[in-house]
Amino acid sequence: MADVFPPIEPYEYGMLDVGDGQRIHYEICGNPDGIPALMLHGGPGSGCTPGMRRFFDPRRYRAVLFDQRNCGRSTPHASDPAVDLRHNTTAHLIADIERLRVHLGVERWTILGGSWGVTLGLAYAQRYPERVAAMVLFSITVSRFADYHWLYHEAGRYFPEEWERFRAASGTDGRDLIAAYHRLLNDPDAGVREAAARAWCDWEDAVVSTAPNRKPHPRYADAKFRQCFARIVTHYFVHHAWLGDGALLENAGTLAGIPSVLIHGRADLGSPVDTAYALHRAWPGSELVVIEEAGHELRTPGMRESIVAALDRFASSP
């Protein structure tokens, strides 16, 4: 099974004005005459990375990557406490994807999304199913209220020491850590914000994998990234991503007919595999691929290869 493709540089960059004072950064790589594809990054608030380009066969795909509002290279950046996030919601991101599609002259595209990118991809596809040719989704999330509670409270049963540090840094009894950190990350004191961002990112990094000898993700060493990521995640999750509880699963039947592969790690403790199974059962015709021993990340053998294989298969389909 193929691993990822060699590193590639984009042949086009741009900043798209999407209103509300927001400009989103996008890049395009691969074959200008290839199959249109869109990468939806996680977080929310992680931004795209050069490694994401490597999932797409550069001979067959015209791959578009963009940084969602207020993160990555999009502006204004959420690391600045003066930036108001009220114009950053799931509905805004769906509208941004449509503006980008029209701007680039794409009729339909194949969507690749991971983690939060799954939630966003599902929400977009349920709003615009006629614009989606196929979907490859990995590290499945559907943003139910119970999913948030699991990740920031119940998953601590597997990482008790890390969770206790996470709870203690919130200054609360731990009943609602998302709300507590949302307040801290918007505190007027820069020291309070930085301590909260570091504690939040420490927990995110702890729960992502159970692989032995795993090293911390280098992105969390960047203070600007920590502030941006933690602010946007808590902003979204304190509002339950502006989605009805379970709505994405309830409406999954509307995606029948869209070819889809769902890829998930059995050892994903941040988003247990039953979430992926529930989406598979609710989505007629979807295919579920479970990677043994993989967690909520891509470095485990089998995850990247399965993503590439699914994209290759769709590129070969009529």
Image (cartoon, rainbow, N blue to C red):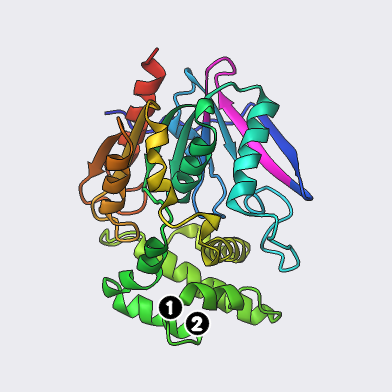
In the displayed image of the protein, which residue is found farthest to the right? 21
- Amino acid type, residue under disc 2 in the picture: Ser
According to the picture, the residue beneath numbered tag 1 turns out to be 166
Relative side of 268 to 49, left or right:
left
Q: Is residue 259 left or right of residue 124?
A: left
Picture coordinates of residue 280 (x, y %)? 29, 40
Residue 246: % across, % down: 40, 54
- Left or right: residue 117 versus residue 82 is left
Q: Residue 83: tell me if it is visible.
A: yes
Placement of the N terminus among the 4 image quadrants: top left
Span shown in magenta: 23-37
| Residue 179, placed above or below residue 306 | below
Asked if the residue at tag 1 contacts the one at tag 2, i.e. Cβ–Cβ closer than 8 Å, the answer is yes
In this view, 293 is above or below 221 = above
Q: Classify residue 187 by image quadrant.
A: bottom right
Viewer-nearest residue: 124 or 233:
124
Residue under circle 2? 170
Q: Which percent across, then down, holds residue 144? A: 41, 58
Residue type at the position of mark 1: Phe
Residue 67 seen in this snapshot:
no
Secondary structure at badge 1 equals helix
Q: Nearer the viewer, residue 22 or 5?
A: 22
Residue occupying the point 67% across, 60% down: 78
The picture quadrant where one finds residue 216 is bottom left
Question: Which secondary structure dominates the residues rendered in magenta?
Answer: strand
- Magenta segment: does it hold 33? yes
Rendered-image quadrant of the C terminus: top left
Task: Compute the Cα span from label 2 to label 1.
Answer: 7 Å
